[in-house]
Image: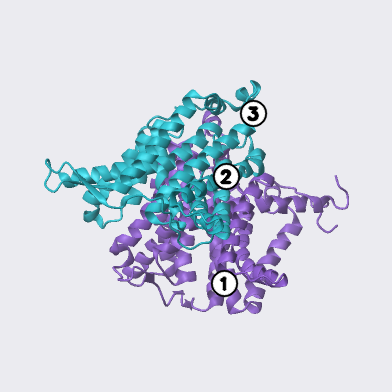
Chain colours: A cyan, B purple
Amino acid sequence: MAFFLETLLGGLMAGMLYSLVALGFVLIYKASGVFNFSQGAMVLFAALAMARFAEWIPAITGIESLFLANVLAFLAAGVVMFVVAWLIERLVLRHLVNQEGTTLLMATLGIGYFLDGLGQTIFGSAIYSIDIGMPKEPIFVLPGVFEGGLLINKEDLYAALIAAVLVGLLSIFFQKTITGRALRAVADDHQAAQSIGIPLNRIWVIVWCVAGVVALVAGMIWGSKLGVQFSLTTVALRALPVVILGGLTSVPGAIIGGLIIGVGEKLSEVFLGPYVGGGIEIWFAYVLALAFLMFRPQGLFGEKIIDRV
Amino acid sequence: MFYRENGQFKTSYRADSQIFPIAQDRWGVLALLAFAVIAVPLLADEYLLRAIFIPFLILSLAALGVNILVGFCGQISLGSGAFMAVGAYAAYNTYVRIEGMPLIVALLSGGFFATLVGLFFGIPSLRVKGLYLAVATLAAQFFCDWVFLRIGWFSNNSSSGSVAVSDLSVLGWSIESPISKYLFCLGVLVVFGVLAKNLVRGAIGREWMAIRDMDVAAAVIGIRPMYAKLSAFAVSSFIVGVAGALWGFIHLGSWEPAAFSVDRSFQLLFMVIIGGMGSIMGSFFGAAFIVVLPIFLNQALPALGSLFGLDISTALVAHTEVMIFGALIVWFLIVEPHGLAKLWSIGKQKLRLWPFPH
């Protein structure tokens, strides 16, 4: 029982991180109808930027404090992501207004490849580490209930907390601020939003910036867990079924989908994996999402798609 | 001046609806084919055949298959690598497990099993489309990667996980030398190219295109979406499966699942985008482009760097390659969504009217 609960908790916390990456997808889709396949490349790019700035800034300015260096590196990487967002809007999206979803999807694939190459050219392609001072040691809870207590990874716990805070902030941003309302208006109808004076281009830049920041936070957490390296881009591929399960247009969907996928992955790996040879995490999430699609094509909380001629 | 159609009168429907209605095109294609069959084996050395021509032919075939699905039927697929893998492993298993199995039959069985798997993963296309479908096909990719890596039966329980074939021959003609491999692939490509061209300009091809352009409207005018979509999946995965079998048998000789990873799927999609979505010709252009560009960059970039006194490392070349691919895809989508094939046909159109602009 304790083992089951541990697996469950581990799954929930991993799921929180998937939600974070999935949120990047959902944000961009909600506000511009673009399915951003470059999210993985953005996570890698942001993490690379942050890892390298955290090395460069103390080397140049002579800052001793690890915390200050990390904050500065985070801000610098944030600025870089802003520039990237602005360039993407300027160079790509502006020219692809009113194109079909699949065209935009393939364009973001191109953007992703470009960012992969660019990031590794500028920041180097070795494995870097991000040290944001997350405690690595596990903690034990409820020692009275279970023998030996429940083992919880502190690092995962902090990561899940950060993710939860970010998700909360974004929900408030989307629901309560004027910009957030404008974003939702654009998502509903580009033309109508434009006609009441919402600047479409600026909204897109904002959305991609927010997605960039989400990528940065995700990259920071994943990077400090796994090290910053090319395999970070696959994190986005892991988060794709989350989006599908939760629905492309729903922020709560991304969170709940992430939790379901996280738990499903861990449980399937631990309890089903040994019978079929292990390593089933990756496709299990996809097959789960796929099976779900057959019954509810728009996902858990997605809007129903109505086609008209 | 020489590329005109005036004076070439069509007096029957047959003559009017042939693949190459202009005589110069027919002669051009025949000349190209003659060049490919006779001149290339004589002129090209082993490196050229192995590094450029054979991969180009096989990837053209795969791109042709992907183009039928993505370009003609509008069902975006990121799982083509998986269908190649299914083709390769199914062909391997039939070839190794059945005594005296002819090579051609083994290759076709690769296509057949790829069709079955393709149909299975094509079923979601009846419910979902566009972005959701792209993710659904990714499921095929990851599932197949896992199956061929983890289930020993498929790789004949080989301890290293990689499989190999040797002593290939068709009707007593040994396919071991680069030239015979090249000619064999060329033959397969020509056969499938003609078949595909005829399919897409027939009734079924028009159904696919109607579904691509607007599936609801197509359903309204009496096209069965299920039949059209699943047939596109079937034809596409058959061709891709045969290409995968060729890639394993002829090009690689021995391979492991990593040869058909998700990167291969993306690569095939890029071929279709750059070459031209919805164009048979475009598949060849796209494949040629993607095969040649990395080789070209590997040669050109260090040379260019030394011109300016810079030392360009292989890692930088690799990153630049990825960046150029990404930039090109975006550029093509913005500027010329129909790819190189469209540029080619614009060029021909201009030539027909030359020297007059209109």
Q: Secondary structure at mark 1?
A: helix
Same chain? Circles 2 and 1: no
Residue B224 visible in the shown view: no
Dot in front, 3 or 2: 2
Residue B256: % across, % down = 39, 66
Q: Chain of mark 1?
A: B
Q: Secondary structure at mark 3?
A: loop
Look at mark 2 in the image and give the residue it sits on. Answer: A79
Indicate left or right for A251 with A287 as reference.
right
Residue A9: % across, % down = 25, 42
Q: Secondary structure at mark 2?
A: helix
A117 lies above or below A265: below
Q: Chain of mark 3?
A: A
Indicate left or right for A168 with B324 as reference.
left
Residue type at mark 1: give it. Answer: Ala
How many numbered marks does the figure carry? 3
Front-most of B288 and B9?
Answer: B288
Look at mark 3 in the image and give the residue it sits on. Answer: A199
Q: Which mark is residue B51?
A: 1
Residue type at mark 3: give it. Answer: Pro
Q: Quadrant of the C terminus of chain A?
A: top right
Residue A163: % across, % down = 39, 40
